[in-house]
Image (spheres, rainbow, N blue to C red):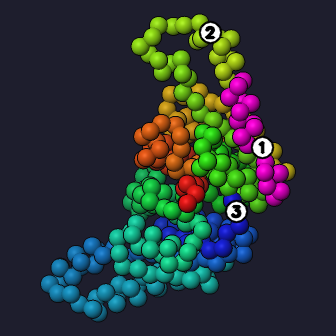
Amino acid sequence: MDSLKSLVVGVDFTDGSKSALAEAVRIAGWNRAALRAVHVVESLVLADLEEAIGTADPALRENVLEDTRKAWREFAATVPGSESVEFDLRIDQPIEGVAASVEAFRADLLVMGLQGTGEGSGAGTVATHAVRRSRVKTMLVREDHAGPFRRIVVAVDFSPTSRDALFAAMRLAAQDGAEVHAVHVFNPPWLRLHYRSATPQATSDYRKQFMDALSRRLESFCAPDDPETRWVKPSFHVFENRNHGHGIVEFAIANGADLVVLGTRGRANLRDFFLGSTAERVVRNAPCSVLAVPPSA
C-alpha cells in the first residue's frame, strides 16, 4: 500500500485483536508511521451498570476506565513493540468511537481483528460495520495470522477503486516479499440472459474467446505504473462465478491466500456500487485477513 503516516488499531483484548495489534506494529515500523491503539468502552454498558446501582456515579466510571487502562498495559506487554504505543480510551458506541479515533489521529489505515468478542469464525459485526463506514483503508486480521503476508489475492473489476486496491496489494507485496494473484471474477453474460434460449455465442469457442479477451484486459489493467512495485510480477486469473463475492472467497480458498485486497465500491452492478455488497460478502466469509480499500476522495 502507499506510504503510511499514521495507523489506528482497534483492541478489545481478545486474541483476534492481539494479532491485529502485532500486525499494526509491524506495518507501522516498516512505514515509520505513528501508531495509536483505541479501545471503546460501550456507553450502554456503563448506563446499565449505573442503572443497576440506581445512580450515575462518577467514581464508577473512573473505576471502569482505570481497570481498562490496566488491562491495556497488561495486554500491550504481550505484543512485542507495543509497550510504547499511544492508547486512546473512549466511552461511546464501538463503531462511532473507533471512527472518531481514526478521524482525530488522521489515520491512513485502520487495523482490527477479523473476529471480535463472542463472535464466531466469520467476520465480527463491529469489523463488518467498520469496513462499511470507514473512509480509510481498513485491514481485518485473522486471529491465526502472524508475520508477513505470503500470498495476496487482489480482486479487480476494472473500476478506479479496484486500481487503488491493486496498488495497495502490490506495495504490500513489495514490503513483505509476497506473491500477488490478480483475479477478475465474472458472471458469464450468456448465463444472465436466462429468458433466451441457447445461442451460438455460448459455444465453447466463444467462451474461450471471451475469457482470453478478459485475460488480456486484466493484464493491461494491472500493468505497473509505480517504480516501487514494478518488480512485483502478479499472476492473472479470470474466474467464473455467478456471484462476485462468493467467487472471490472461493478463489482465495483454492489458492491458499493469507490476504484478500479489494475495493469497497466496484462496478459489478448497481447494488454493489451503492452498498458495497460484494466487499461486505467477502468480509463476512473471508478465509483469511482482508484489506478493504475505499474509493478515493
Where residue 217 appears, as percent x and y from the top left, is 71, 33
Residue positioned 50% across, 73% down in the render: 103
Question: Is residue 195 toward the left or the right of residue 181 in the image?
Answer: left
Along the viewing direction, whichever of 83 and 10 lies nearer the viewer = 10
- Crowding at label 3, few (<14), some or many (≥20) Cα neighbours within 10 Å? some
Residue 223, disc: 1
Label 2 or label 1, whichever comes before in sequence order: 2
Find disc 2 in the rendering and name its residue.
Answer: 203
Please tell me whether mark 3 sits on a helix, a strand or a loop.
Answer: loop
Which callout, 2 or 1, points to the residue nearer the camera?
A: 1
Residue 189 on the magenta span: no
Label 3 or label 2, whichever comes before in sequence order: 3
Residue positioned 41% across, 88% down in the render: 66
Q: CA distance from mark 3 to mark 2?
A: 43 Å
Answer yes or no: do the residues labelled 2 and 1 have beta carbons within 8 Å? no
Where residue 43 appears, as percent x and y from the top left, is 30, 76
Range of magenta residues: 212-230
Residue 2, disc: 3
Answer yes or no: do the residues labelled 3 and 1 have beta carbons within 8 Å? no
Check disc 2 and give the amino acid type. Thr
Q: Quadrant of residue 248?
A: top right
Along the viewing direction, whichever of 5 and 213 lies nearer the viewer = 213
Question: Is residue 26 toward the left or the right of residue 45 in the image?
Answer: right
Please tell me whether mark 2 sits on a helix, a strand or a loop.
Answer: loop
